[in-house]
Amino acid sequence: MIIYEEILREFQKQKVKYVLVGGIAFNLLGGYRNTLDMDILVEMADKNLLKIVNILKKAGYHVKQPVDPVMIADKKTRQDWVINKNMKAFNFYKGERTYEEVDIIIDSPVDFKDAIRDAVKVKAAGLNLTVISPKKFIEMKKAAGREKDLKDIEDLKLARSLR
């Protein structure tokens, strides 16, 4: 059983349009580091976002922000959050005493359409996972530019060269 399996199964069942990015993608692409949250880049269509919100709520996830999570499905609201609140991701968490968090990336240097076009398909625990390609992963990490992101780039290049 993999972490977030319940959510990923429901994504598959309901045909949610998403791409795994972040630490889980890093591990699935051949890198290795501990990660606790699940970062996803998603198609920003209202219907797709509503599916995601409902799946997460049904699985017991909540938002820390004092807003109705359904508001993420409104394009104008998302744009306001990005422009006026500098929001990069919309966070859902399972509980105060758990590490389980899901971040929906809402401001990304890589567009969902570009990410899905060359995404990698990975099978794990009977699931067909959609994972950002190494090239797009590196593009996202370069844009973030934090020290840990630059280290991920080097570690991923090394891991993939050893295959």
Image (cartoon, grey):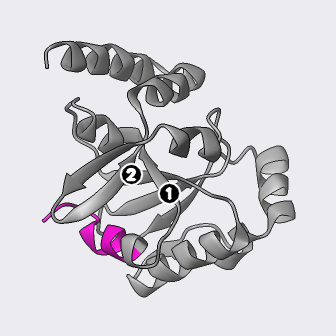
Q: Is residue 81 above or below residue 111?
A: below
Q: CA distance from mark 1 to mark 2?
A: 7 Å
Q: Tell me where residue 118 appears, x and y as whole percent.
A: 48, 37
Residue bounds of the magenta highlight: 1-10
Q: Which amino acid type is marked by label 1?
A: Tyr
- Residue 81 magenta-highlighted: no
Residue at the image point whose x is 29% and y is 21% from the top = 156
Q: Is residue 146 left or right of residue 101?
A: right
Q: Nearer the viewer, residue 48 or 70?
A: 48
Residue at the image point whose x is 54% and y is 29% from the top = 140
Q: Tell me where residue 56 appears, x and y as whole percent.
A: 46, 76
| Label 2: which secondary element | strand
Say which quadrant the N terminus sits in: bottom left
Q: Tell me where residue 60 appears, x and y as whole percent.
A: 40, 82
Q: Which amino acid type is marked by label 2?
A: Thr
Kindly identify which numbered label has been placed on residue 42.
Answer: none
Q: Is residue 96 above or below residue 89?
A: below
Name which quarter of the figure residue 99 lies in. bottom left
Residue at the image point whose x is 64% and y is 39% from the top = 108
Marks 1/2 in contact by CB < 8 Å: the verdict is yes
Mark 1 or mark 2: which comes first in sequence? 1
Residue indicated by mark 1? 18
Crowd around label 2: few <14 · some 14–19 · many ≥20 (10 Å)? many
Name which quarter of the figure residue 9 lies in. bottom left
Q: Is residue 119 above or below residue 65?
A: above
Q: Is residue 94 visible?
A: no
Crowd around label 1: few <14 · some 14–19 · many ≥20 (10 Å)? many
Q: Is residue 134 above or below residue 123?
A: above
Is the stretch drawn in magenta largely helix, strand or loop? helix
Q: Is residue 56 visible?
A: yes
Q: Nearer the viewer, residue 60 or 52?
A: 52
Residue indicated by mark 2? 130
